[in-house]
Amino acid sequence: MLNELYKKHKESGLEVLAFPCNQFGAQEAGTNEEIQDFAKSLGVEFRVFQKVDVNGSKQHPLFDYLKEEQKGFVTDGIKWNFSMFLTDRDGVPVKRYSPGTKIEVIEKDLLEVLEKPATPHASK
């Protein structure tokens, strides 16, 4: 369903960045190449990066930032694969979603973000 959302809104500026993680029940036990092949076999069109840790001492710095900006419920740790963050056009996190969040809820928030232009950056 995320791929369908991407196809529907990519012309409006939506980018989906997927970061596979094997910290949840060894669901991403394959190699990075196997993960890429699997995503392609499902018709995934958005970017799928190499596996990363999203929790713990070896977590990717992106998840330091995302979790600091959008706190979790009870704990800030990522609780399961398919947790998602919505950022604005400037990359600032505006919402965090649990894996079970309905795509319609995400799309509603996404449309609000897509309506706003990026902040012009001051020239140096």
Image (cartoon, rainbow, N blue to C red):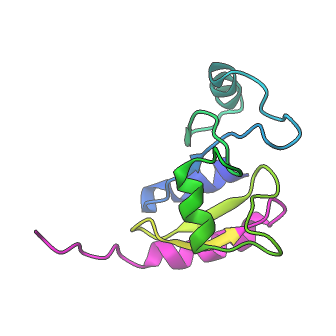
| Residue 63 % position (x, y) | 59, 56
Identify the residue at image location x=63%, y=48%.
59
Query: Which image quadrant: the C terminus?
Result: bottom left
In the image, residue 45 above or below residue 71: above
Q: Quadrant of residue 33?
A: top right
Identify the residue at image location x=58%, y=33%.
50
How many numbered discs? 0
In the image, residue 64 above or below residue 42: below
| Residue 41 % position (x, y) | 70, 25
Magenta run includes residue 109: yes
Q: Nearer the viewer, residue 39 or 59?
A: 59
Q: Which residue is the extreme one toward the front?
A: 57
Identify the residue at image location x=68%, y=52%.
2
Report if residue 19 is visible in the image: yes
| Residue 116 % position (x, y) | 41, 79
Report if residue 7 is visible in the image: no
In the image, residue 56 above or below residue 77: above
Identify the residue at image location x=50%, y=54%.
15
Magenta run includes residue 80: no
Q: Which residue is the extreme one toward the right?
A: 25
Q: Nearer the viewer, residue 33 or 71?
A: 71
Q: Is residue 19 left or right of residue 115?
A: right
Q: Nearer the viewer, residue 113 or 66?
A: 66
Q: Quadrant of residue 106?
A: bottom right
Q: Which residue is the extreme one toward the left?
A: 124
| Residue 10 % position (x, y) | 49, 54
Residues shaded magenta = 97-124
